[in-house]
Amino acid sequence: MEFLPRPLFSADHEAFRDQVRRFCEKEVAPHHASGEQAHGVPRAAWQLAGRNGLLCCWLPEEYGGPGGDLLFDLIVCEELGRIGATGPGWPLHSVIVAPYIAHHGTPRLKQQVLPQMVSGEKVGAIVMTEPGTGSDVAAIRTRAERRGDQWVINGQKTFITNGHNADVMVVACKTDPERGAQGVSLFVVTSDMPGFSRGKNLQKIGQHAQDTAELFFDNVAVPDDHLLGEVNKGFKYLMQELAQERLLVSVQCQARAEAAFEWTVQYVKERQAFKQRVADFQNTRFKLAGLFAELQAGRAYCDRLIELHLAGRLDAVGASSGKLWHSELLARVTDECLQLHGGYGYMQEYPIGRAYVDARIERIYAGTSEIMKEIIARSVCDDIKK
Ligand SMILES: Cc1cc2nc3c(=O)[nH]c(=O)nc-3n(C[C@H](O)[C@H](O)[C@H](O)COP(=O)(O)OP(=O)(O)OC[C@H]3O[C@@H](n4cnc5c(N)ncnc54)[C@H](O)[C@@H]3O)c2cc1C
């Protein structure tokens, strides 16, 4: 059984994949259960990843990065997915948080923050969602007010991935509350700023090795050069960067779905029922054949989305369609694969059981399936291309 070949990865990428695979098997997989119990991974794991060149691979050398391309970071994401690791949140740090700073930060801010994100000394988070609003980003209430030569932030955020460990946070704030989406700006807040505090590490139903936290901002004074880009342009930057965030979800879902499938193929070949292998029942064979075909389609679709993105041609509709499709693919695959494991599939100790629960969030974060459909429907029904 072989999935479709992936010509977009070069020999260098494949050599890097081998290295990341060995790293994940040696340094991540053995500690994953303790990460799940602790609801997060220790900081030392971040630094080890940094020393091994696994963080922000796409960043140029002037910011401490290896000057690779995005494919290297996507490989890290795929290899974590392959072993069913839900933490550490390296892909979010490298592929979602660092780009905001690299694309919109001042030269000084970039020098201050990015090399330490590459080394794993600093952990990044993207901070949009609030207790009162998630899908409707324009309705956020966290306020940044200009006072003298700095900004003062007040408000509360929730569900923030890496939030319990984060040192560097890209925070969406209202700078002009009367103007809705046109009144949003992005700021880089660091955890050492007075007035910043964290709430509890939230107890989720899945993705237990990933920390997710509430964050509080009580008169946090932020220097002017921590504003990303221009004031009141934050919503535009979010929409630009969200395409890459949604692509990352597609990549992650495809990798996790392939892993779930492979575990299941192995299981049904070993498990006996009615004096034959579970793999010998026609139902099992047809189910797996159908899933294999879906995974092939998913891989081709995912790689095409990556290619389009690398060529600068993946728009919001394209990224939303992929996120919708791949997150729902993962839900179908993990459900069918769990069923083929019978009762063992429902046990925590089997990776398929955990993967089934872990998959559920993919249809919610980075924009829910309903919001993805809204974005797609606007272009289909109203001829709005965004
Ligand atoms: C584990 C986890 C990690 C997360 N990580 C982060 C993070 O790192 N940073 C961050 O900022 N946020 C993060 N989030 C937040 C996540 O992005 C939001 O939960 C998500 O966008 C949905 O927002 P909400 O929870 O407020 O739901 P709501 O917006 O309240 O939605 C509730 C329901 O209404 C539906 N709905 C809303 N609007 C519409 C509409 N216009 N049309 C049709 N249906 C609609 C939704 O689809 C959903 O079914 C995370 C969440 C979780 C659970």
Image (cartoon, grey):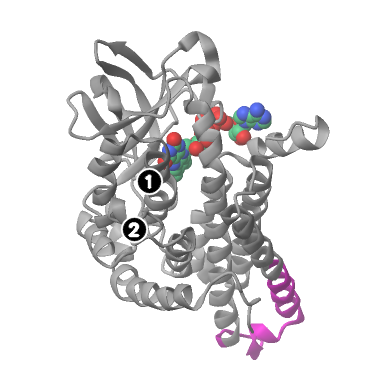
Q: Amino acid at mark 1?
A: Ala
Picture layout, residue 254 above or below residue 313: below
Count of numbered circles on the image: 2
What's the CA distance linking mark 2 and mark 1?
10 Å
Question: Which image quadrant is residue 307 in?
Answer: bottom right
- For the question of whether residue 122 can be seen, the reply is yes
Residue underneath mark 2? 55
- For the question of whether residue 41 can be seen, the reply is no
Q: Which mark is residue 293?
A: none
Q: Which mark is residue 98?
A: 1
User: Which quadrant is home to the N terminus?
Assistant: bottom right
User: Which quadrant is home to the C terminus?
Assistant: top right
- In the image, farthest residue toward the right: 381
Disc 1, SS: helix
Tell me what residue is drawn at x 24 percent, y 34 percent: 190
Image coordinates for residue 10, horizontal then vertical, percent: 52, 74
Picture layout, residue 368 above or below residue 130: below
Disc 2, SS: loop
Is tag 2's residue or tag 1's residue first in the polypeptide sequence? 2
What segment carries the magenta color? 270-294
Picture layout, residue 135 above or below residue 300: above
**In this rendering, position of residue 41 left or right of residue 365:** left
Image coordinates for residue 143, horizontal then vertical, percent: 37, 16
Label 1: how many Cα within 10 Å (few below 14, some 14–19, many 20+):
many
Tell me what residue is drawn at x 33 percent, y 62 percent: 66
Q: Amino acid at mark 2?
A: Leu
Image coordinates for residue 285, horizontal then vertical, percent: 72, 80
Tell me what residue is drawn at x 41 percent, y 29 percent: 229
